[in-house]
Amino acid sequence: MDFKKIEMIFLAVFIALDIFLFTSYLKSRNAVVITNNSGHISLTKEMDKDNIAIDKKLSNSSQQGYYLASKDSPVLRINQDKLRNQSVSYNEEKHQLNSILDSPILLSVQNPQQTLNRFLAKQQNVLFGQQYHYEPKLSTKSNIVYIEDRKIGQFYEFDGRITFQIEDNRLVSYQQRYIDDITVLREKQATISERHAVDSLYTNNDIPSNSQIKWTALAYGRLLKVKSNTIYIPMWYVGFTTKDSKTMQISKINAFSGAIIKDDQKRQVTVNE
């Protein structure tokens, strides 16, 4: 193994990480930061005026998380021959396994995850299936999402998802990505609170008037990618709908700095298909 090459790659990753964090820090200094209860109350009143509803009581408690790193891995491609009763292909660019079942599997209309949980439990059906769990927040009737869940935390990033395609209440195919060989880069750090995350979205005009915040979740997401190495940090994911819209928009907030994460494309999930 070329340890010198690996050392240089991680040095590049750390340099890029430091540059990104410094940029995020400068941006966050310009953001409106809420630091006391009276400020939260004031923002809540302003959100009420803008007809922004929240379906749950938001917590003011901080949590903790890590900076994590992972290297692109061909582990799905290497193990794909273990799969049975399905036609499998592998996308080298996305590191994604694509599967079409030989025979569709009937699912429960009310609780499709019950059958899917049993399906994932067998290695011949899904590789590393027991390392994923059902995530209703990201799922629809036609696309049921499972996310990678490790002892260190859960991953909402596409890098760690299985998406099952459902037609007429039958499982017909799925796409899988897997985050392998996860390394902790730094000690645990405190995150901003759930309340702070929503406040950041509002003060940065990321939540329009006449919106309804449906859910929030703290999970690991991609901070940056350098060559074949990816850095993950805790992020607050906030799902909200706008008036008369059939799509749920999902915004992301850096849970360390409070900065809004801007994707190339706005993440959307169709609601009530």
Image (cartoon, helix red, strand yellow):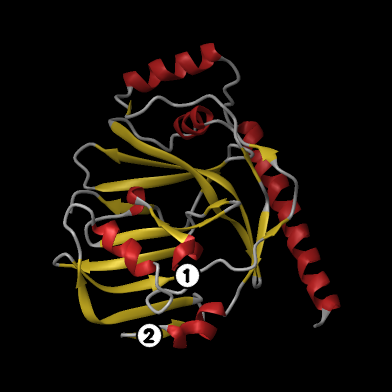
Residue sitting at the far left: 168
For the C terminus, the image quarter is bottom left
> Above or below — where is 207 with respect to 57?
below
- Tag 1 or tag 2, which sits nearer the N-term? 2
Q: Position of residue 238 (x, y in %)?
A: 42, 41
Q: Which residue is mark 1?
A: 177
Q: Around disc 1, counting alpha carbons within 10 Å, would you say few (fewer than 14), some (14 to 19), or many (20 or more)?
A: many
For this orientation, the residue located farthest to the top is 38
Type of amino acid at the residue the image marks with label 2: Val
The kind of residue tagged 1 is Arg
Residue 138, percent from left and from top: 35, 52
- Left-right relation of 237 to 174: right
Q: CA distance from mark 2 to mark 1?
A: 13 Å
Position of residue 43 relative to residue 144, above or below, is above
Relative horizontal placement of residue 66, taking residue 242 as reference (left or right): right
Where residue 242 sits in the image (x, y, percent)?
27, 38
Q: Is residue 102 left or right of residue 217?
A: left
The one nearer the camera, 252 or 125, is: 125
| Residue 268: mark | none
According to the image, label 2 marks what residue?
A: 88
Give the percent coordinates (x, y) of residue 139.
31, 54
Q: Secondary structure at mark 2?
A: strand
